[in-house]
Structures are given as C-alpha cells and as structure tokens.
Amino acid sequence: MAAPMTPAKQTALDWIAQSAPGLSADHMELWHFHEPPWREYRSAAWYVDRLRAEGFTVEPGSAGMPTAFCAQWSNGDGPTIGAYAEYDAVPGCSQEAVPYRKPRAGLHPSAAGHTDPHSALGMGGLTGALALKHAMQTHGIPGRIKFFGEPAEKMCGSKPVHAAHGYYDDLDAAISFHPTSLPALSNTVLWDTHCGCFWSKIYTFTCTEPHEWGGAGDRKGVQNYHAVARAPAAMDAIMQMYAITQASKENMLAHSGSWSVNEAILNSGFATSDNLPPRFAQLQYGWRCPSIEMAEAVLRVLDHNADHVAALTHCKVSSGWVTRTRPGLANHALAATTYANFELVGPPTFPEEAKAFGREIQKTLGIDPDPEPFPANLEELVDPEEGERMIRSILPPWQTNYTSDDYTDYTWHTPTVRLYVGRPVIKPLSDGKVTPHWCRWALGGVSAAMDPMFLTAGRVIATTALDLLTDGVSLDAARAEFESRTGGGIGGSDWIAPLLGPNPTAPVEYPWPEYVETTRGPDWVVPARPDD
C-alpha cells in the first residue's frame, strides 16, 4: 500500500518539479567530467561548492580521500539521515551522447566514460537531499542530513574507508540509490538478497638485486654486460602471476554459486628493449564472492601464488589493499517504508525524445526501429518480495548474497535500504545477439533518458526520509530490526567490523588512470610511480 501524502512530502515533490530544469543541467555538467576512480577532482569540487551554496557544512577530503567529502545540514535536534553521491567513470568506456559508437573527441579512445551512470546516481542522491532540506525548512522538521561524496565506487573504494573511520556511526538510517543493474527489477528495493563481498588487492613485484641472479654480475675479459644471463625480474613476474592464477582459478572455490576473479596490470617493466632486467611491475586483482569465507579462500590462493612467483623471478613482492567490503545486511522495515513511498510517487516515465534516441540506436544496430525501444518494465514497479523470489530462482539455496557494491558497508552501521530505479536500455536483440555496451553509455548522456530516472530517485529518497523523520514509527522499526540483526548494533554479537581495520589509508597513491593538462591540451594518461 502506498505511503500517505503529507504536506511536507508535497513540498518536497513540488521543489523537485520546479528545480528539474536546473538539476538536469547539473547532471549534464557532471556527465561531461567523466573522471575515473580516485581522480574525480572536478566532480568532487563541484559537489563541495554546490552543497556549501545550499547551506551545508562540508568537509572535503574526508577520511583522507582527496576526492571524497562529508556534508552536513541540521535543522535542530533530531534523527540523522544519510545519502550519498557517486561520480566516478570507467576507463575504456569513452562515448559521446550520439546513437552510434563514438568515443569522446580529443581524448584517447580508452579514456573514461560513465556506464551505470554514476553521474545520474549522484544527482539522484543530491536531488533527494536538497528536496528533503527544503521540506524540513518549510515545515520546521528537526533533524540532520548527512550527505557523502563516495569516489571510486567501481573499485568499491571509499565506503569501506569512510566506515572504518567512523563516518557512518552517527547515522540513524541511510538510503542507497542505484540505477537498476538487474533488468527485471527496474523499480524496487532489495529485500533479503543484498550485494556480497568485493575485495581487491595490488601485488607489487620489484627486482632490487638483479646482479645476484646467476652470473648476471660477472664480466671477465671481453665478456659484454648484455651477453650475460639476465634476472627474470618484474616482467616475468607479471606473466607468471597472471598465468598461474588463471590456471588455479578452478581450484580457488567449489564449483557452485556466483563468484568471479578479474585482473588489471597497472605497471609493467620500466625497461626498454634491452638486456636490463625490468625492475618493477604491479598487478591488481578484484574478486566478487557471496561471503567473507569465500573471499578469504581466493585471497589465500593469490597470496600463495605471489610468493612463489617472486621466488621464481628473483623479485620481492609486497601487496596493498584497494578494498574489502562486507556482505550486505537486509532491513525489511526500511525497505517497506521506501517501497511504500515509491508506490506514492510512481515509477519513471520516459518521454518521446528519449525513445526517439533509442530508435536511432536501433537503426545503427541494423534492426527495425520499435515504437517502444525500451523494455516495458522500466516504467513498472516490482514488489520487493516478488523481486526476491526472482533473485532466489537463479541462486543455490545456501547463497545469501549476490553481486557486489560497497554500499554494503553502510548496512553494518545503520539501517540501510537499496533502491533501484529504471534506466533506459535498448530492448534485447533477437537471435541471441548482445546489445553493444556503448548503447547504454550513450543514453547516459541524454537528458531526456536520465532525468526521469534520477528525479524519481530524488522523490523516493525525500519522501522516505520525511517518513523516517516525522511518522514516529518507521525509524523506530528500522532501528529495532538493525539492533536485532547485529546482536545489539555497532559492536554487537553478530556485527561484522570494517574489514580494512581501524583508520585505513585509501589507495590513492597507486598509478590510476587520469586526465591531465599538458602543453598539448587535455590528455589521458596512466602515470608511472615505481614503489621501490
């Protein structure tokens, strides 16, 4: 049953309707930044400036993360409601907002682009927070809004760090919004099966003493340095680590449930085509697992492989964490409150301008344009318990969590809901063909396609938060369930502490891809910083 309309909710909805053109322009500005993880300098600065202009007190660089922030606004003593923005883009996904494949002009084709898109995700959170603030001011509702800037979500990077530094401990509830990533669950909230673990670690191989390898340092008579045996060193270490881990993946975990291991080379070699041994190389692994126990099993294999590879290649190996997330914790009470407000405001509807763009994409793909190029369920609500049944139908009974996202670290510090809102995608192609990814990326830069989604998210966030602040029931129920599931709240008998340990340092020093300004103009680079 839909939540009741109240004067405060109507005020929030009216504010969103009146502010929609400006919010749409804001989204496009963020979409055009398209900055990659840990390097979202312009995006974070934009939010800091905007929130300060709206009367928030803002801490830039929260928890030591240069592109994070923590913003707060208070209307007197009352509950604290949390929400957040994400704004990182994905390397290798550059795309203009055109109905054909076209990377961003003037940049390398492998530059970053928004995929989910986090530009609209962030605007959904901001829309909800600003509408809530306006309603609280207008109706004299006491309470506090705590709004976070969460960088590097594609690496599940910032939220475990914020959590470990205590930033979520004073929240009474939090609302996590994401453009739907589960096609059949376009407009709903998660019920029981929340996201699982994502862990990521970087292994650094350095060859510090190459002369100690065999006869590499012995030169006698007319023997040339380049004729002696060279230490295998860092390049071989990367090759061996990649190969042995690929070969051992089937031995990491049982052949059941959904899990994955992926890798990325951050640095390799730092030597030209010579007989000098490459001194330095870095390889990043990321793995998704339903449980901490499964994630630990993968870690043991990776660490074991790295130690043996280092010995084989005459290297030393060190490692550092990018992230370690906890599996998500459900809260039915908050999910029910949020979905009731979703029923109140209704799902998004997409205008003809967005559909016309979708039909142009279909023409590019060589298929007949459809009057309705998007799946119908993008404009339909899905009951959370029905959504849960659909998720469970593809999972083994023992698997309690599915996919990954770092919002899960919120769930161990405060009652948290996971809100999905439909985003336009092209209908599945016939004959088993897969729709190219650029189609989604291009739609992310079309205001008519993104505005209905993030404005709907803002409506749901604002109206849900107002119930939590005013109805005297919803927040108490959510808090009681949180206490029960954790065995007493933060530090309780069933509570899982942050997996990165107390006060961790974010991995901002690694050579992540980024945009730079040079005498040639803007450029896209992968900087090199050997960690000798």
Image: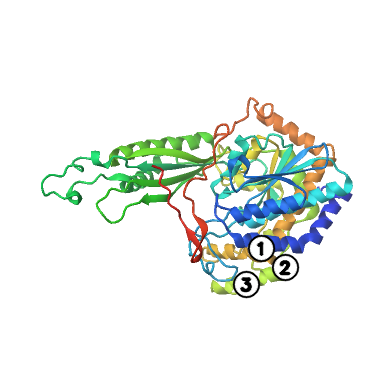
Q: Residue type at mark 3?
A: Arg
Mark 2 surroundings within 10 Å by alpha-carbon count, few (fewer than 14), some (14 through 19), many (20 or more): few
State the residue position of label 2: 351
Asked if the residue at tag 2 contacts the one at tag 3, i.e. Cβ–Cβ closer than 8 Å, the answer is no
Q: Amino acid at mark 1?
A: Met
Q: Quadrant of the C terminus?
A: top left
Residue displayed at 32% across by 48% down: 235
Is there any visible trace of residue 83 in the rendered image?
Answer: yes
Q: Looking at numbered disc 2 in the image, what kind of residue is underneath it?
A: Pro
Would you say 441 lies left or right of 382 here? left
Q: Which mark is residue 359?
A: 3
Q: Is residue 180 visible?
A: no
In the rendered image, the residue lying farthest to the top is 493
Q: Position of residue 182 (x, y in %)?
A: 61, 52
Taking depth in this image into account, of 73 and 334 the one nearest to the observer is: 73
Q: In the rendered structure, find residue 493 and report the number of the disc placed on it.
A: none
| Along the line of sight, the residue nearer the viewer: 14 or 437 | 14
Circle 1 sits on which residue?
Answer: 28
Question: Residue 170 location in percent, x, y?
Answer: 71, 35
Q: Secondary structure at mark 1?
A: helix
User: Sequence-wise, which precedes: disc 3 or disc 2?
Assistant: 2
- Tag 2's secondary structure? loop
Q: Tell me whether circle 3 and circle 1 mark residues in contact (CB < 8 Å).
A: no
